[in-house]
Image (cartoon, coloured by chain):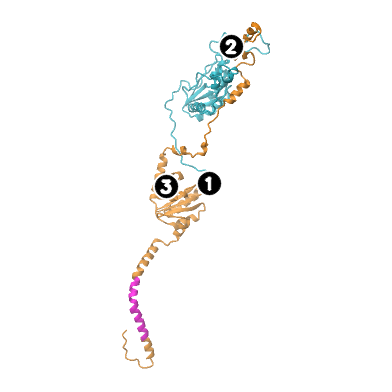
Amino acid sequence: PAGPGGVAVPRAGLKKLALPPDYSGITFPEKAKLKFMDKVPAVPKVRREPRQLRDIRGPSREATDFTQGQYGILALGGGYLHWGHFEMIRLTIGRSMDPKSMFAVWRVPAPYKSVTKKSLGHRMGGGKGPIDHYVTAVKSGRLVVEVGGRCEFEEVKPFLTRVAQKLPFPAVAVSRESLQEMRREEEEKRLNNQNPWTFERVVASNMLGMRKYLSPYDLQLKGRYWGKFFLKHRV
Amino acid sequence: AAKMAALGGGGTRWRRAWLPALQLLRRGSKAVTRHWKAMHLQRQKLLAVTEYLPPRPAVPPRCLPRPAAAEGREEDGYARVLRRQVEETLRGSRMVAVCQFNSMADEDVAALRHFLRRHNIHVKFFLNEVVRPVLAQSKYRNLLPLFVCRNILLVSPETRAREMLRVLKGVPQVNLLGACIDDTILSRQGVENFARLPPLEVSQGQTVAALSLLSSQTSSLLQQGPAHLTALLDQHIRRLREAAGPAEPPPGQSTG
């Protein structure tokens, strides 16, 4: 509202009293805090496995939706999580949350994939190096941890964003509503795109012989993924 | 491997559709890298061509009026209660004065309330957004332009404008904007004139006097003729007495 002289006059309206949130349908798991994840699986691998970076590439098929909690950390890129990351997440969340009113749950398995490293200072050759550590592969669109309980998103968001910034891939703190909103916006963008030329269309019908310069995986990835990166601004 | 086989075949390039997955693997890094892999120019061009174009309506939405914000507002029970209070206050008061209210210290507000309460004037604070719909539906429609920014209502079941003006003159932070006294909307000058009017009893007495003036005049009118005659005759007798003063007063034939 503009007052005299064009200056906006601040005005206090009626206070709207909101009802307290309803936490009736929430079941707590046995342990509220995050479980300790092993550095090495119980049965360590004997056979060294190939790198297989395709477990980083593309969208995730598992753990994309919420199960127990209301808030979580969504991965917006692919990457590997090793034991250091797991400890960081476990300790930060354990420190910042209140175990009486909140709980947290892992949505990624303990490190299972062995990663080899040759010892430093040696030339190429001489076979594959020994197993150095174990990692978990995370694809874009996967939830890493879930937090729930008698709490609001604003309480949980600060420490979840702090954890998300420390992860090796871009990540963001989400709630059920914000994830739904994100998906709805994506869908809306896809539908009201005024550009008649879409990546999907060009690749599917191989216009201008574009498939010579693209990967066969681009048929599924549709230009939104490049290597381990997720291009959020695309379509 | 396919190229080697083709060269070994006879020197001619064996033209066949070749899959880039096999051939381009020979050069450069793998598909998934830790760093941002440089894209082929054709791919960059394709991504540039297939970018997202947001819809652009002919009229930008911010130029259109905003009905959605005004429509879906739920009826607030608290607002209803406040509106009922406003309605009751307006119904039970003969004088309603709207004043502009600037910030004052709390004790000054309390002192103002006290002085006005002495003359049975109540100070009411109402929110504009609560008062506006109430006024729009009642008979005080024309007071709506006064309810802008911070204001207070001075309501009273009796009309004592003079005392109210005297109290408000001592408080510079409260300025009278307008009033509605006995279903008459008055501006600031109107209220001052109203205050200068004599009190009710005096004006009633004046009205009675004005009305009975005619009847009081009737008797004097009727008596005017004989009174005039009496005066003339008295004057005449006096002159005769003065004339016959030195001489013997004649036997009085006065018919007075």
**Residue sitting at 35 percent across and 77 percent down?**
B224
Q: Name the residue under label 2.
A: A50
Marks 3/2 same chain: no
- Check disc 3 and report its element: helix, strand or loop: helix
Give the Cα separation between the discs numbered 3 and 2: 78 Å
Which residue is labeled 3 in the image? B136
Image coordinates of residue A19 in percent, x first then y, are: 43, 34
B87 vs A223, nearest the viewer: A223
Where's the C terminus of chain A, which quadrant?
top right
Q: Which chain carries label 3?
A: B
* Dominant secondary structure, magenta: helix
The mark found on residue A3 in the picture is 1
Q: Are marks 3 and 2 in contact (CB under 8 Å)?
A: no
**Amino acid type, callout 1:** Gly
Q: Is residue A115 left or right of residue B78?
A: right
Task: Decide: is B214 above or below A36.
Answer: below
Q: How far apart are marks 2 and 1 (CA)?
A: 71 Å
Disc 2 marks a residue whose amino acid type is: Pro
- Residue placed at 35% from the left, 80% from the top? B228
From the rendered image, report the letter of the chain displayed in cyan. Answer: A
Q: Who's orange, chain-wise?
A: B
- Extent of the magenta region: B216-236
Say if mark 2 contacts mark 1, CB within 8 Å: no
Badge 2 or badge 1: first in the primary sequence: 1
Mark 3 residue type: Ala
Residue found at x 44% / y 31%: A21
| Label 3 crowd (10 A; few <14 / some 14-19 / many >=20) | few
* B6 lies above or below A58: above
